[in-house]
Image (spheres, rainbow, N blue to C red):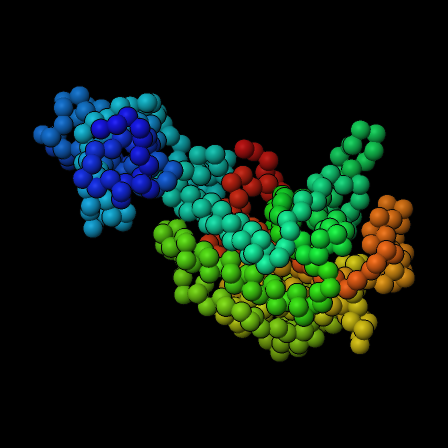
Amino acid sequence: MSDSLVTIREVSGHVGQSVRIGAWLQRKRSSGKIAFLQLRDGTGFIQGVVAKTEVSEDTWEQAGKLTQESSLYVTGLVKEEPRSPSGYELVVEGIEIIQVTQDYPITPKEHGVDFLMDHRHLWLRSPKQRAVLTIRAEIKRAVNEYFDTNGFTQVDPPILTPTSAEGTTNLFHTKYFDEDAYLTQSGQLYMEAAAMALGKVYSFGPTFRAEKSKTRRHLIEFWMIEPEMAFVDLEQSLRIQEQFVAHVVQSVVQNCRPELTTLERDISKLEAIQAPFPRITYDEAIEFLNQNGFEVPWGEDFGAPHETAIAQAHDRPVFITHYPASIKSFYMKPDPNRPEVVLCADMIAPEGYGEIIGGSQRIDDPELMAQRFEEHKLPLEAYQWYMDLRTYGTVPHSGFGLGLERTVAWICGLEHVRETIAFPRTLYRLYP
Ligand code: 4AD
Ligand code: MG
């Protein structure tokens, strides 16, 4: 037997061999002459079986000392075991304890969410949290794969900015030496500049909103994917959005079955996520809501209950298009046939997960853009560079932003976005 470690993920290639694994003990069950060790090493889970009559006295003693989350090196023979969820079992031959852990705070009993969030650094070790982070990583991989293979160039916009991108009410302020600076709310305006240089671009990074909303869909720090495309109109953008989201969901279905099973996710609901996605206009949404027990006057924005009601009528994400200009961002292009609405769309996820994408065609006309700056009382000097994009070779262009955490929550079937990122930043939490 060699000294090098084998991971639990790799044991299938070592059936009938003796291997050494670095692991933590999740749980232990023993009955006089036999101990069952539930072991994990980050790559997976395996049961180690220690038989008193088959191992040295010392090994049996070591097994007896192991507590929850004790760390150890274990050597054993890999055996196929059809009854085990992993398909394999370890017939333990030797145990080398690294540390016997005392009083691990997270026990198999139920804990409240606040307690678990205070121990987030340890909670991450549980099978469900591990499954969520694995799926998040697969979603990120699939996002990059989609754009990298469809002619997009990844560009990184700045995180420290002199101005706001999505309104001034929820900016995080900081000092930039003698100047004022803000943490970015969205890379979009910079991505528009990048699209004029590279055609089709996307960004993928953290964004910040000092939002006093304490809902299950809001984080203070969240990650956004922001594609921006020159010579692309709203209709073409919607087609890209539905293909992109379907690709991400199907990648998870294909590559993360064990994790979806751990989360008890209904996989058939995810398999249904195929392009095209249904579309309704804001006007149709208002009509639908008012026929279904709501009272929403034209011109008002939708809240979570409205979005959920609309989503429930569909088995895949739904686009709501053509919102009133008055409730949307300053940069959205008015519909030429009906200037009181804009060429925009929100994508609402199924099963009550709410808005996962906000996007639009952008204003390309320099005069209208200048007018919008005035109407929104935005300081033109600070946005001169953004105006330049309309002055020097303006073209029709569109883009959108997908919120990573809401997408992870939806795909994983999680109640709250706080479990979708390793260390969530929420209204009342900066620790750990
Ligand atoms: O709709 P939003 O605010 O759009 C923008 O920021 C545009 N500049 C994007 C663009 O066109 N490039 O945000 C986009 C998405 C939302 O649909 C939502 O999924 C997510 O970002 N999001 C949040 N996710 C978690 N916590 C928050 N506080 C979020 N705010 C927005
Ligand atoms: Mg939005």
Measuring 78% from the left and 47% from the top, which residue is drawn there? Answer: 164
> Does residue 284 lie above or below 27 as drawn?
below
Number of callouts in the render?
A: 0
Q: Nearer the viewer, residue 386 or 194?
A: 194
In this view, the residue farthest toward the top is 58
Indicate the position of residue 417 as horizontal and vertical percent values.
Answer: 54, 49
Measuring 33% from the left and 27% from the top, which residue is drawn there? Answer: 71
Q: Is residue 227 left or right of residue 127?
A: right
Q: Nearer the viewer, residue 157 or 125?
A: 157
Q: Give the image quarter of residue 88.
A: top left
Instruction: Indicate the quadrant containing the N terminus: top left, top right, bottom left or bottom right.
Output: top left
Indicate the position of residue 382 as horizontal and vertical percent values.
Answer: 86, 45
Q: Is residue 164 left or right of residue 20?
A: right
Q: Give the image quarter of residue 38.
A: top left
Measuring 78% from the left and 37% from the top, which residue is drawn there? Answer: 181
Indicate the position of residue 240 as horizontal and vertical percent values.
Answer: 61, 64
Indicate the position of residue 161 as horizontal and vertical percent values.
Answer: 76, 41
Q: Nearer the viewer, residue 153 or 10?
A: 153
Residue 72 can be seen in this image? yes
